[in-house]
Image: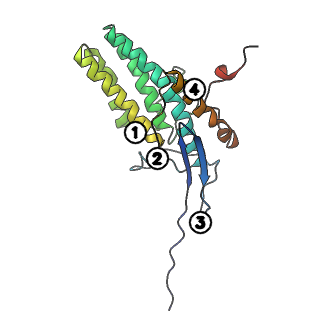
Amino acid sequence: MSRTVPPPTPTGPTVSASPATGPTVSVSAPTGPTVPVSAPTGPAPSGTVGAPPADLRRLLAFRAHGAARLLLICRSRLEDVEGAVAARQTEVAVLMAYELVQLSLSVRGLRTEGEPVYALGEAAFDPFAGVPAEEAEAGMRLAADGLDAVGERGTAWLDRLREHLLDTEALLGYGEPLPDVRSGSGLMKGFRLVRTWQPVLERVGLPDVLPDAWTRRAD
C-alpha cells in the first residue's frame, strides 16, 4: 500500500533585533523551494498586509531602514507638530503632520515595495509605495483633522498621531520599544542600533541606514 507524502514546507528568513543588542539574522535551512536573496519583490497579496516580508533583503530593509526612519526623522517631525500645536499655529501643524504621516506610511511600505533611501520632497520618492489605499487615505484624514486641533482637541489629535507612529513601530517586530533619541542615553542607543545594521546590510547589497552626510568626515 502506498501513501502520499506532502511536499516539504519552505522556511523563510527571520531577523530578530532589539535596540540594546542589535540585529541577529538567521536563515533557516531550506526544506523546499526558496526565493533567491536578490529576487525582486512586488506588492503583497491581498490579506497579507500586516505580515512580515518573506524576502530577506526586503525584510532587512524594512526592519533596519524602518527603525532608522522612525527614530531619526519621524520623531523629530512629531516634535515640530507638537510645537506648532502649542503655538496654536494649526495650519503649520497640519502641513507638518502631512509630512509626518507620509513618513510613517513610507515605513510601512518598506514591507513590500517602498524605497529604503529617504528622499521625501523629491519627485522620484513615493511615500505611498506599497501602502494599501485605505491606510493612505486614513493617514491623510488624520493629518487634516489638525485644522481643528486647538486646546483639548489639539491634545487628542497629537495622541492620535503618536498612536499612528506606535502602530508603525509595532510592525517592525522589535522585542522592545525603540529608544527615545531626545535623551542622551536614548540617542546613543539609537545610533548604536542603526550602526549595528551596517555590516548586515552591506552583506546583501543594501544601502546604509544613515545618510552619507551624517557619516562623512568634514575634512
In this figure, which residue is indicated by the disc labeled 1?
132
Distance Cα–Cα, label 3 vs label 2 = 23 Å
Label 2 environment density (alpha carbons within 10 Å; few <14, some 14–19, many ≥20)? many
Residue drawn where x is 45% and y is 19% of the image:
77
Residue drawn where x is 44% and y is 41% of the image:
171
Q: Amino acid at mark 3?
A: Thr
- Drawn side of residue 209 relative to residue 47, left or right: right
Residue drawn where x is 47% and y is 32% of the image:
106
Q: Is residue 104 visible?
A: yes
User: Dot 1: what SS?
Assistant: loop
Q: Please provide percent x and percent y for residue 75.
A: 45, 23
User: Dot 3: what SS?
Assistant: loop
Distance Cα–Cα, label 4 vs label 2 = 35 Å
Distance Cα–Cα, label 2 vs label 1 = 10 Å
Residue 31 has which mark? 3
> In front here: 142 or 128?
142
- Drawn side of residue 42 relative to residue 141, left or right: right
User: Dot 2: what SS?
Assistant: loop
Sequence-earlier tag: 3 or 1 = 3
Tell me the quarter of the picture where residue 137 sits: top left
Disc 3 versus disc 1: nearer the observer: 3
- Drawn side of residue 22 relative to residue 95, left or right: right
In this figure, which residue is indicated by the disc labeled 4?
188
Disc 4 versus disc 2: nearer the observer: 4
